[in-house]
Amino acid sequence: MPIQNNDFKKKILQRILKSKKYKYIHPPTIERILDSLSTKYEKKTLEKEAKRKLHQIWGAYFSRPNFSKLLSKIKSEYQSGKSREVILRELLMLQTSTKERLPIFEEYYEQIFNITDIPESITEYGCGINALSYRWINHDISYTGFDVDSELIHFINSIFKLFDQNESAKAKLGDVFLFEEFRPADVCLLLKVLVLFDRQKNDSSLDIMKAIPAKFLVVSFPTKSLGGVDKGMEENYRKMFYGLISGLPWNVSEVIFENELVFVVEK
């Protein structure tokens, strides 16, 4: 039976926000997930299922450090002469996708910009640590990344400020399902997030892509599992993506890397 008791859902929300793993997740995001699951699960399983869903869409892809201690350490190391690039490379090792891109970041953005031309502005939804790859985006492009993790957002902005990038690059708290309108940009990065959108709301990814006011969408999918196994994912995601946008007047270019299939979509 669907759970209609809002007080009960609020209690679960508070318990989740007190947990070590999820206390920095945007509260409206947790509320949204609780509301969607409350139509499917009984009271005794709702909290467990909400945490499972949060793990699927966020926790499984991120090795979370103590950001406060890490920021203090980085500031000390930077003041002692450790280079910006070495620090950024170490930080980008924290997340599976950015760790995979680390050897090819320069080539990664170069190939994308060969298709889009150098943009004046970029947005990224579900940015995670990838926001710190701004160093390789270069060109003084205006960048805004959105994520649902408030502590991560604070950390990223602190790094941007430390490296004097905060005039052109910033991270903001935001949930794609809760935006009244999206921020306009020349290029929007949607890196390995479409599947995560659809896990939260069936068939939502196409509506999100349509709603984003960007000339180009850069959409990517993994070609290997988290364990590094090739399971035919490249062809499956290619077929899925072209089926998803079938009938739309969008021009699509493909860029293929060892661990990632990238579609550059001109809307």
Image: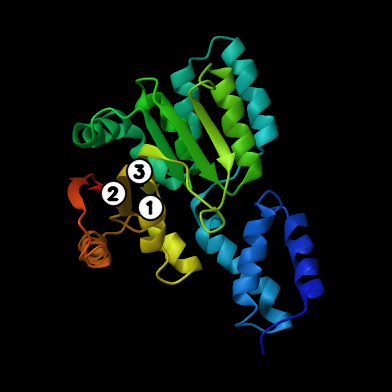
Residue that appears at 57% across and 47% down: 174
Where residue 20 appears, as percent x and y from the top left, is: 72, 52
Instruction: Identify the residue position indicated by label 1 in the image.
Output: 192
Tag nearer the camera, 2 or 3: 3
State which quadrant residue 39 falls in. Answer: bottom right
Question: Upstream in the sequence, badge 1 or badge 3?
Answer: 1
Instruction: Identify the residue position indicated by label 2 in the image.
Output: 260
Contact between marks 1 and 2 (CB within 8 A): the answer is yes
Eyeballing the image, is 89 above or below 39?
Answer: above
In the picture, the disc for residue 214 is 3
Where residue 67 appears, as percent x and y from the top left, is: 65, 36
Eyeballing the image, is 213 above or below 103?
Answer: below
Tag nearer the camera, 1 or 3: 3
- Amino acid type shown at disc 1: Lys
Where residue 201 appears, as percent x and y from the top left, is: 48, 69
Question: Upstream in the sequence, badge 1 or badge 2?
Answer: 1
Secondary structure under tag 1 reads loop
**63 to the left or right of 238:** right
**64 to the left or right of 222:** right
Q: Quadrant of the N terminus?
A: bottom right
In the picture, the disc for residue 100 is none
